[in-house]
Image (cartoon, rainbow, N blue to C red):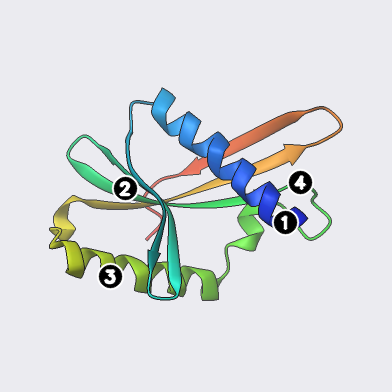
Amino acid sequence: MKYNQRIGKFGEILVKNYLVRHKYDIISLNEKISFKEIDIIAKKDKKIIFVEVKTRSSNIYGDSVDSFNVSKMNNLKTAIEKYIFENKINEKYLQIDLIAVDINRPQKTAKIKHFKNIF
């Protein structure tokens, strides 16, 4: 596994644990839809929440939020639309969140930023 993939998986584990601590029920991790992927699908307060996780261990190219660009947003929307259709989910009960993880390796810390209802 490449370094970036390991960092991404580590970020997803941190976010999964964060969501569980905040009373989210995890439905699925790394849900594959055609050639797209939804990082985390969770449930809380009758809502199905689709979570995109972005993790960075360096800010050379910007922080983790900066890595969520229009192309990635469109891929996420496509995957969610297909998931909703296949699972007959009422769009009224949906939420799409972005959770950004910035890892500080020297200090062995991670900062989690949770953006709710991003679109």
- Which structural element holds mark 3? helix
The amino acid type, in three-letter code, at marker 3 is Glu
Q: Do the residues labelled 2 and 3 touch (CB within 8 Å)?
A: no
The amino acid type, in three-letter code, at marker 2 is Ile
Q: In this view, does 4 lie above or below 113?
A: below
CA–CA distance in space, label 2 to label 1: 25 Å
Q: Is residue 73 above or below residue 100?
A: below
Which numbered tag is attached to residue 43?
none
- Which structural element holds mark 2? strand
Q: Mark 2 points at which residue?
A: 49
Quadrant of residue 80 in the image? bottom left
View extreme (front): residue: 1
Q: How many marks?
A: 4
Identify the residue at image location x=72%, y=39%. 103
The earlier-in-sequence mark between 2 and 3 is 2
CA–CA distance in space, label 1 to label 4: 9 Å
The amino acid type, in three-letter code, at marker 4 is Ser
Q: Mark 4 points at which residue?
A: 57
9 with respect to 94 (left or right): right
CA–CA distance in space, label 4 to label 2: 25 Å
The amino acid type, in three-letter code, at marker 1 is Asn
Q: Mark 3 points at which residue?
A: 81
CA–CA distance in space, label 3 to label 1: 27 Å
Q: Mark 1 points at which residue?
A: 4
Q: Which of marks 1 and 4 is in front?
A: 1
Q: Can you say which quadrant of the picture contains the C terminus? A: bottom left
The earlier-in-sequence mark between 1 and 4 is 1
The earlier-in-sequence mark between 4 and 2 is 2
The earlier-in-sequence mark between 2 and 1 is 1
The earlier-in-sequence mark between 3 and 1 is 1
Q: Can you say which quadrant of the picture contains the N terminus? A: bottom right
